[in-house]
Amino acid sequence: MIRFIFVQNRQGKTRLEKWFGSYSDQEKQKLKAEVHRTVASRDQKHQSNFVEFHNNRIVYRRYAGLFFCFCIDTNDNELAYLEAIHLFVEVLDAYHGNVCELDLVFNFYLVYAVLDEIILAGEIQETSRSVILSRLEHLNNLE
Amino acid sequence: MPPMKGLTVFIADLRKCRSHEDEEKRVNKELANIRTKFKEPSINGYNRKKYVCKLLYMSLLGYDVNFGHREAVELVDSTKYSEKQVGYLAVSLLMDDESEYLRSVVRALRRDIHDGSEWIVCLALNAISNIGSREMAEVLTSDIVVQLLSPAASMFIKKKAALCLLRLLRRFPESVKAHQWVGRIAPYLGHRDIGVTQSVASLMTALAQQYPEETRKAASFAMRRLKSLVIDNEYTLDYVYYKVPAPWLQIKLLRLLQYYPAPESSEARATLLSILRHIIDLSQDVPRELQQMNAQYSILFEAINLGIHLDIDQGLMQECAVLLGRFITSRETNVRYLGLETMAHLAAYIDRLDSIKAYQGVIVQSLRDRDISVRRRALDLLYSMCDVGSAKAIVSELLRHMAMADVALREEMALKVAILTEKFATEYGWYVDVMMRLVSLAGDHMGDEVWHRIVQVILGNEELQVYACKISLQTLKAPVCHESAFKVSAYVLGEFGHLIANAADSAPIDQLKALQSKMTSTSQSARAVALTTVGKFINLFPEIKTLCLRVLDRYRGALDAELQQRACEYYALGTLEGEELLPTVFEEMPPFPERQSALMSRLLKREADTEDQRTWVYGGREMNRERRGVTSGAASNDSREAVAESSAMPVPATGLNDASPGSPAASKKGAQEALPVEPPTDPSVAKSMRNYARLLWENDGILFDGEEIQVGIVAQYKPPSGRLGVFLGNRATAPLYNISITARAADGSQLTIQPAAGQEAEQPETLMPLAQARMFFDIQCQQVFTAAPTLHIGYTVAGCAPTVSELQLPVTVGHFMDPVTISVADFFARWKQLGDSGIAESQHVLPSAFLTKDAAGLEWLRSVIGGMGFALIHGADPEPNNIVGVGIATTQAGRFGCLVRVEPKPTHGLTRVTIRATNVEVAQSIGGNVKMVFESR
């Protein structure tokens, strides 16, 4: 199960945080900082996309200046979540038309809606790019 | 939703702020503005939505936003989709479980979940998944179930409803009453929509762990669905991800199947095999594109995991091992990582490790990989694949890497080295050497558990003590001595320093000097340990008492309260008039009671933190088999081997990790009833008696060996409870039907024996020739009992009347005995004391011709008494051939001390055995056991 999802930039600013468990505000702040420290310091070329984090694991991938991080259980399938990140990014990209960091900032409330169509309750809900995109378009046209 | 201009401007404003102070000013201004706006009665929906969004943005930046909850609820009640959407988002981001507004939200959800428009229902389901409070679980579960099962509900509603239930089930399992609807979910695994199947498979995986019986059908649904995807290519193009059909669904289904045992029917097995083979064949060529490769490999690794779990085809396993061998040398770091991880899974189950050992060199190399994540996996794999044969090599490699390993990895490495060394030690010296080196190398990076455990092990194993003393003294004399090594050394010398006091350069004065030389440079906690050692030295070595007192005296003024207190108290003890108190206080420590090693618990804790249960853990085969036995209890056909194995287990010569030795003894009623009460004409009566007698002092062996069945026993006692494994083998040439294995305590006896949790359901109905069934029983000894429990085995051979065999179980009060070490003086004091009371004694003079014929007879006698749970006290009896021992029998009602004295007279071919206990029935029962063992030799 996914514990939380962060999208952070290289300076460590969190552009999206989605929590699937209950954490206090203090824990949240601490985890965001720790994840950034853990992930940003890793060698992107020669190191894997997986790293141990407390009793869980972070699966992450960097797109331009943004780190997309999923925190998952140690018995979850790492590659499956690595590709779920890619699916998420592809959907964002198509939805916003070549997505950039600022899109996530200004449309933060929409990013949550996008996520709700792909991942729910910490599990992958829908994996077809076309199904997700046509659904989002439909919802976007509602008043 | 069209963008809200005011919000965009506000965000842009904040981004323009140069300093944090500027930003804070802007935020405070906006908060004041919003407060006023919210007070206006005329505020419209659009503005409300906009301001709530601004609040959300500020809260995400980390500002404390503690108002706007009411407005969020008002948005939820709006009829406009975009306002409702922001409303629910605000509720999930701003409110916690205690919010007073949550009740109104639940009311709104209840309304929206039955709304006529599909997207409103979906919005409500999203909100429940995101918030998931207890009240929602209690009030809304049935509505969600209705939506999931309703034929009218859209695909979107169905998949969201399934995940909603999953969220509530995980968080509040007691509130969702899953037993009411669990049976109706499985067929949805066959749903034509892949999105629905995907979500239902996640829900099903959680249900499978809680309701294995009710969800049994899910396995065949999952298998059929997999087959349609993998072999029959039934999927829509929408779900093809970089040329791979629905990878996430394939993975989910492959994982779901790992929560069920391998199917019984050969047809189903063949289907599963062909699916796995198909997936493996597809992965033979490495795809060019990264996404395709990842998707393909994610399925492949899950398929290998399923293959390992099912364990139905040797050829497939070999192929997997070869594939994994290729992966761990891959140039892709991700693939190396997963290769090592999956190989650890293989190592945790496979019978012969040879195919993995071939890669030992590569794996050791991986400890130096550029990526710490890969290094971790290599460590886990080495830990899992370690066995008696490779322990020395692996441990020494790990020690070699310890010095250069990352700080983050060192603690785990240290834990694993400690566990492996203890588990696979075959020589005392090796254990002590490795552990001392370990604490010196990694002392700073590990918890106290490690050095505590070393002390426990040394205290519990007499044979280790002299060598441990020598090494301890050397350690203290070395130029540099690590803190933890110092603590171990100080403790060991304090307990056993006298054992080496006559050796060269090891006189008491040398020991004290060595200790003192390092004391000044260690921490306070280490000094505290050392002070206790000095105190013990006063008792052990009266000749250096003055010197010891001088050391203590110096610390009587220590600033640290703990040091001061110890010094003062020990000083006072040492200078006290009278000789009695000192030896009593500093009496040798008794061995620590057997318990699960704290090292193990620490390691397991790390792995326990997963939402879905792990289907395997890092570590060797025994560990995983034990887990499997406990969780699924699947009747495996290798249990015959397990019986043989557990007796021939590579138990270290020291028995370092051995469980408490059970201590057999039979009821005083004697041999006659101990025999199978089965067909009286059975020619194997004498043999059965021998079998039974053997189980009075050994923990496992054959209980009954008939023409049709064979019954084996494996027992483990943790007084006052125990666990008994019964293995039933079919020796006939035809299958046995209607198998039943039950155990009964004798009427009125204070003993309970019942199937271990989850066992009853696992009894197979049919047993094929040469197959084995097994059954575990939990035993509790409430009070001393005299009549042994019985085992009833029923079965039918085709065409015959049902047979029921009744066997007496080798479970007596003597089995609940643990060895206790006491000093020679104490032994005779208690022996006399018990003898004076005169009642609780059992004495037999037993013919023992074997003593004259067999030179090893005496040795055998010692193992019998030791096996019964007595700690043998060497050199206690003036007559060297005599054996004396001490044990304590534990029942829930009380503990009974028990002393034994065996006086063999080889010249006469007789042996006198005397048992004295604090309870007459215990003495008689054990006396009877010894008699029976003699008679059946």
Image (cartoon, coloured by chain):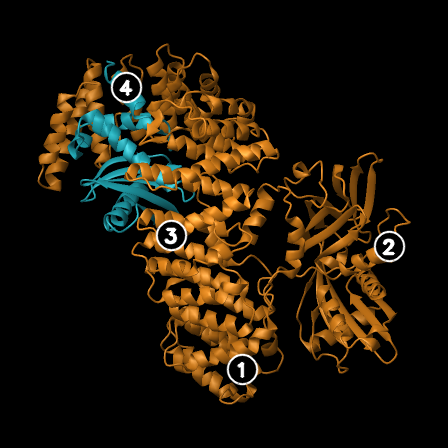
Chain colours: A cyan, B orange
Question: Does residue B105 sit above or below B484 in this rendering?
Answer: above
Q: Is residue B244 left or right of residue A11?
A: right
Q: Which quarter of the figure is the N terminus of chain B placed in?
A: top left
Q: Secondary structure at mark 3?
A: loop
Image mark for residue A134: 4
Give the Cα distance between marks 4 and 3: 41 Å
Q: Which quarter of the figure is the C terminus of chain B placed in?
A: bottom right
Q: Position of residue B529 (x, y in %)?
A: 46, 72
Q: Amino acid at mark 1?
A: Ile
Which residue has dot 2 on it? B685
Q: Are marks 2 and 3 on the same chain?
A: yes
The answer for which chain carries disc 2 is B
Discs 2/3, front: 3
Give the Cα distance between marks 1 and 2: 60 Å
Q: Is residue B10 left or right of residue B907?
A: left
Front residue of A69/B590: it is A69
The answer for which chain carries disc 3 is B
Image mark for residue B538: 1
Q: Secondary structure at mark 4?
A: helix
Front residue of B473/B304: it is B304
Q: Is residue B909 left or right of residue B598?
A: right
User: Is residue A24 among the parts visible in the rendering?
Assistant: no
Which residue has dot 3 on it? B328
